[in-house]
Image (cartoon, rainbow, N blue to C red):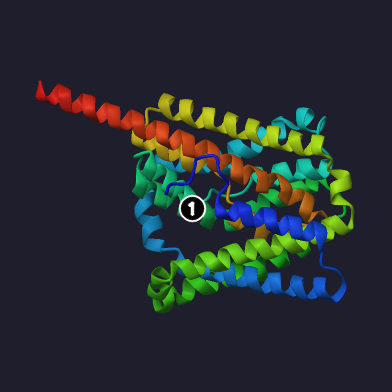
Amino acid sequence: MARPRFLPDNMTLMLIAVVATATVLPCTGQTAVAFDWLTTLMIGLLFFMHGAKLSREAVVAGMTHWRLHLTILLCTFAIFPLIGLALKPLLTMFITPELYLGILFLCVLPSTVQSSIAFTSVARGNVPAAICAASASNLIGIFLTPVLVGLIVVAHSAGHSSLDSILKIVYQLLLPFVAGQIVRPWIGAWIDRNKSWLRFVDQSSVLLVVYVAFSEAVNQGLWHQVPPSMLLSVIVINALLLAVIMCLTVFGSRRMGFSKEDEITIVFCGSKKSMASGVPMAKVLFASGSIGMIMLPLMLFHQIQLMVCAVMAQRYAKRMQEASVKAEIGAGS
């Protein structure tokens, strides 16, 4: 039976359970240290698996449609962050500086892979281009997101060691990813046959990081710092961000003369943000005491984008079907 469009997905339900567990039973002391080491290992394994999974041939083949890919990358890594920065005077009236930093972090993340492709397929868009665009976004994001985060942290936070962040990025993200790319010729086929195992590593890494981060945040009084009214403000801000970027991708792609199939690909790849990449990156890039606050906007955005994109994909599919029927009638008359 199909899942109702507004029912949270399984990953969201697990995240809610993990946050609830961290709220009631936060890890402390040596347990917290052990979990921290475990999450570091899981993040390294995650990026190793992503390196082994990513097909360089698919990305290279997709670059022939450079105009579409450049548009998606600009939406993901330029327009989205600029929107977050432009809205600062408004956003800081309703949320704390830590939560605003979380909004900025959300804005510089790469696009999702699985859901971007899935929604493009449902909406009858350019699926091969979506595969290439989502893969390229994640590959570039491994390098570009930390750079953008560094610029944002320097501008909006004090006492951050950029050298320490660079070293963490290198040995926790880049080295495992490069190692995965190197061994892909030998294990790539096995990875392709066992995508469910990669999904398990993916989700386990995210859940572990969320549990450890929210445990520390709860120990430091997270829910006293984020009352229900501020939580509602974050939800509204996320919805506003998604609405703005979706309007820009829809009308921008039409003004630039893209086909309807390419428009669909731009909308779903250019407006999505990856929680699977964002949560591990937050663990690497930010001080442990602030991770909970920084990840909160991303976790809420994750569910909002799934619900909104599910509705939009169905509407696009209906329009494409109606257009196809009209074309057939016109050809037959």
Residue at position x 37%, y 73% in the image: 189
- Residue farthest toward the bottom in the current orientation of the protein: 186
Q: Is residue 4 visible?
A: yes
**Which is nearer the eye, 70 or 126?**
126
Neighbour tally class for label 1: few under 14, some 14-19, many 20 plus, Cα within 10 Å: many
Residue 96 occupies quadrant = top right
Helix, strand or loop under label 1? loop
- Residue farthest toward the left in the current orientation of the protein: 333
Q: Where is residue 270 in the image (x, y as percent from the top left)?
A: 51, 40
Q: Position of residue 244 (x, y in %)?
A: 59, 29
The amino acid on which the numbered mark 1 sits, given as a three-letter code, is Val
Picture layout, residue 130 above or below residue 189: above
Residue 85 occupies quadrant = top right
**Which is nearer the eye, 6 or 29?**
6
Q: In this view, does 212 lie to the left or right of 113?
A: right
Picture layout, residue 189 above or below residue 101: below
Residue labelled with disc 1: 113
Residue at position x 74%, y 74% in the image: 37
